[in-house]
Image (tube, grey):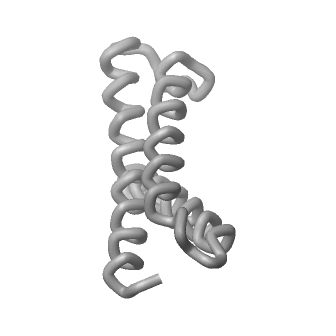
């Protein structure tokens, strides 16, 4: 993978993680304003579906010509999950 493509890979997956978290908050406020956050709800299902489609589509387009794509799929998943965990940790402990 070229250097520029690797930069797009990491920044894109980081951005997908950030968008996933904030889309969950958006759908939570839109559909259940005032109710406590529930992780088994319509908002979670909508966010999970949208984020998964974006994640799979972006990484498929970026990794379809790679020699060893399985390694990069795991890295992409790790970067995305790390960005979500980092945002939750920053918000929780600040």
Q: Is residue 1 above or below residue 25?
A: below
In the rendered image, is residue 94 in sight?
no
Residue furthest toward the bottom?
A: 3
Q: Left or right of 92: which side holds 26?
A: left
Q: Left or right of 7: which side holds 81?
A: right
Q: Is residue 31 above or below residue 15?
A: above
- The one nearer the camera, 29 or 55, is 55
Q: Is residue 84 above or below residue 38?
A: below
Residue at the (34%, 70%) spot, across then down: 8
In the rendered image, is residue 71 in sight?
yes
Q: Position of residue 34 (x, y in %)?
A: 36, 14
Q: Left or right of 14: which side holds 41?
A: right
Residue at the (62%, 70%) spot, across then down: 69
Q: Position of residue 57 (x, y in %)?
A: 47, 47
Q: Is residue 31 above or below residue 4?
A: above
Q: Quadrant of residue 50?
A: top left
Instruction: Work out which quarter of the rendered image holds the C terminus and state it.
Output: bottom left
- The one nearer the camera, 42 or 8, is 8
Residue at the (40%, 13%) spot, across then down: 32
Q: Quadrant of residue 76?
A: bottom right
- The one nearer the camera, 94 or 14, is 14
Residue at the (52%, 66%) spot, across then down: 63
Give the number of marks: 0
Q: Position of residue 54 (x, y in %)?
A: 44, 43
Q: Left or right of 29: which side holds 59?
A: right
Q: Quadrant of residue 64?
A: bottom right
């Amino acid at each position: 993978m070229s250097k520029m493509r690797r930069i797009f890979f990491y920044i894109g997956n980081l951005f997908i993680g950030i968008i996933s978290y904030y889309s969950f908050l958006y759908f939570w406020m839109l559909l259940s304003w005032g109710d406590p956050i529930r992780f088994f709800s319509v908002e979670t299902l909508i966010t999970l579906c949208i984020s998964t489609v974006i994640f799979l589509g972006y990484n498929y387009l970026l990794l379809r010509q790679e020699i060893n794509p399985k390694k990069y799929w795991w890295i992409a998943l790790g970067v995305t999950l790390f960005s979500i965990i980092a945002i939750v940790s920053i918000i929780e402990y600040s």
